[in-house]
Image (cartoon, coloured by chain):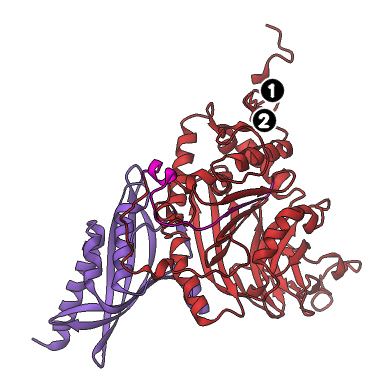
Chain colours: A red, B purple
Amino acid sequence: MDRGENAPMTSKHPEEHPTRVWPAEGDCRAPYWIYTDPAIYRRELERIFEGPTWSYVALECEIPHPGDYKRGSIGEKSVLIVRGEGGEVNGFLNRCAHRGVQLCQDESGHVREFMCPYHQWTYDLSGRLRGLPFLRGVKGQGGMPQDFELSDHGLTPIRIHVRRGAVFATLHEATPPFEDYLGEKILAFYDRVFDGRQLKLLGYSRQRLAANWKVMIENIRDTCHASLLHVFFVTFGLFRADQPSKVRMDDEGFHAALISERGRQELTDATRQIRSFKADLKLQDPRLLDTVREFPGDATVVMHTIWPNLILQQQSNTLATRQIVPRGPSEFDLHWTFFGYADDDEELTRRRLRQANLMGPGGLVSMDDGEIVARAQEGFRAGPDGASIAEMGGRDYTDSDHMVTDVALRAFYRGYRKVMGL
Amino acid sequence: MNSALALRDELEELYAEYCDVIDSGALERWPDLFVEPCLYRIVSKENWDKGLPLSLMLCESLGMLRDRAFASQKLNVYAPRTWRHSVTQIRAQADGDEIAARANFVIFETLHDRPTQILCAGRYLDKLVRSGTELRFREKICVYDSALIPGSIVFPI
C-alpha cells in the first residue's frame, strides 16, 4: 500500500483527526465530534476565546470603587478586572509576574494594591510592579541585578472595553472595536437592556454543567425548544411558537437576538401540538408571573447570545448575564449575574427577585436546560459519527419573523466553521 | 421532662420529618410544614455574605411553596435521582413566640447511573412557631456554602 498522502491514520499529529470532515449537508448539520474531541476543543480556545473576540467579564456595578476587583475568564484563563485610581477599568491576567502564582483567589474583593503572598511582589491598581522585598539585597548580599527594572515586570495587561455598564475583554490585538464587532443591529438590542442607566447588582448563581460549552449557546439559539421543553414557558405564554417573534443576527451570524411577546394561556394551533401545554394549570400564587412592561416596544423577552461567551437575558422583569467558562470538551461553568437598574423602586426589585425563580440552577425554566444539555452530551458520547439536524424553517441564514426555525443554529455553525477551518 | 430536652426532641422530629418529606419524594406534603405568612429561600453563602438579595429559590407564601412542589414533581424535566439529607447540630433559642433555630445540612445526590456526590452543604437559618400543638416553619433560609452547584438543584432543600 502506498504510504503517502492516502494514509491519514499515520499522520504525525493523530490528535488532529485528519479524517474528520464536516457532513456534506453543510450548516444544517453539526457533527457530534465537535462536542467531544479534545483537539477541536484546544483549537476553540486558541481561535475563538483567545482569538479576535470580546469576552464578557463583568458589570461595572460589581466594581464601583477604586480598588474593587472581580475575577473573570477569557476561555480558561483567569483574569482580574479592577477599578483603577482614576475610575477607569483595568484588566490583567490573574498571575503574578514573578513565579506565575495566581494573584487573587476570591471571586471579588477590595484591595489597595495587589500583593502576591509567595514573595510579596506588589502591584498597583493599574498593574505596575511597585516593589519587591530584597530588591537591592540584604546587608549588601543578593538582590536583583542592577539592570532589573520594576517597570519591565508588571502584570500582563488585557484590552478592556466598557459599554454602558458591561465590561468586555480580549487577549487578541486584532479584535475589532466592540461596536463594529456587535454590528448595528445587535448593538441596538444590547443598548435596549444596557440603556445607559446605572445598573444595580442583585446577586450571583453559579453552576457546573457536564456538557460542551457550545450546547449552552445552541440551547438559547434553538428557539423551537423553548416552546416544547419548558412547561412554564409554554403554558403561561412566556416564550411560545404562536406568539409574534423574531430572530435577528449580525451579518456573520455570530451574535443573535431572539425576540418574542408574551401570549395567553389558550388553546391555539401551536399549543394543540405541544404536549407540555397545560390548559388547566393555575399557579396558587400568581405573583410569580405578575410582570410589568418596562422596555419600549412590544417585545417582552429578548434573549441575546453575544459571541463567544455571553448570554444576555431579558425575560419579562428578570435581567441577567450568563457567562460561559469552558472547562474541557465536556464541561463548562455557567455564571449568572442578576441585575436591575439603580433607579428601580422596591416593587420592581421585588418582581425581579421573584421572577428569578424561573432562572438559574434551580430555575423553574432553566433547570430543564441545565439537565438537557448534560443529557445531550451523554448522547454525543455514544459516538462521534452522528450529527444533529438543523433544518426547521429551511436551510438558509436570513433573519426570521417567527421562531419555528433553526436559522440561528445554522448561522452559528456557519460562523463557527469559518473560524475553526472546518 | 425538662422543657429544653422536650424542645430538642420536638425539633429533631420536625427536621427528620422535613428531610423525609423531600427525600422520599412526597413534596406535596412539604408546604404543610410551614405556616402562613412564610418565607422560604435558598441563598448562596456568596450572596448572603455580600448582602445581595438574590435567591436560588424564593417562596413568599404557602401558595408559592405549593407551586414549587408541584413544578418539581410534575412540570420540570430532569434526570432521575435520589436525595439524602443529613441535618446535624440543631441549636435553638426561644425568642418570644418564635424559636430561632440553626442547623447544618448536607445533601447527597445520586443520579441513577453515577456514584453518589455531595450536591451542597450549608446552614439552615430558621424561625419556627407553634401551630396548634405542632412546631412549624415561619421562615427557612438555606444558605449553601459553595456558590458553584454541580448541575442543578431540582428539589427544595
Where residue A413 sits, quadrant-wise, is: top right
Disc with the residue nearer the chain's start (2 vs 1)? 1
- The secondary element bearing badge 2 is classed as helix
In the depicted structure, whether residue A188 falls above or below residue A393: below
Give the residue displayed 22% in from the left and 72% down from the top: B33
Return the residue found at the far bottom: B96
Label 2 in the same subunit as label 1: yes
Residue type at mark 2: give it. Glu
On the question of residue B129 being in view, the answer is: yes
Q: Position of residue A190 (x, y in %)?
A: 68, 61
> In the shown orientation, is residue A358 left or right of residue A130?
left
Chain identifier of the residue bearing label 2 in the image: A
> In the shown orientation, is residue A36 left or right of residue A135?
left
> In the shown orientation, is residue A150 left or right of residue A208?
right
Q: Which mark is residue A243?
A: none
Where residue A311 sits, quadrant-wise, is: bottom right
Chain identifier of the residue bearing label 1 in the image: A
Disc 2 and disc 1: Cα gap in Å?
A: 8 Å
Residue type at mark 1: give it. Ser
Give the residue displayed 61% in from the left and 40% down from the top: A407
Q: Which residue is mark 2?
A: A16
Q: Which residue is mark 1?
A: A11
Which residue range is magenta in the image?
Answer: A254-275
Give the residue displayed 8% in from the left and 86% down from the top: B1
Where does the C terminus of chain B fall, quadrant-wise? bottom left
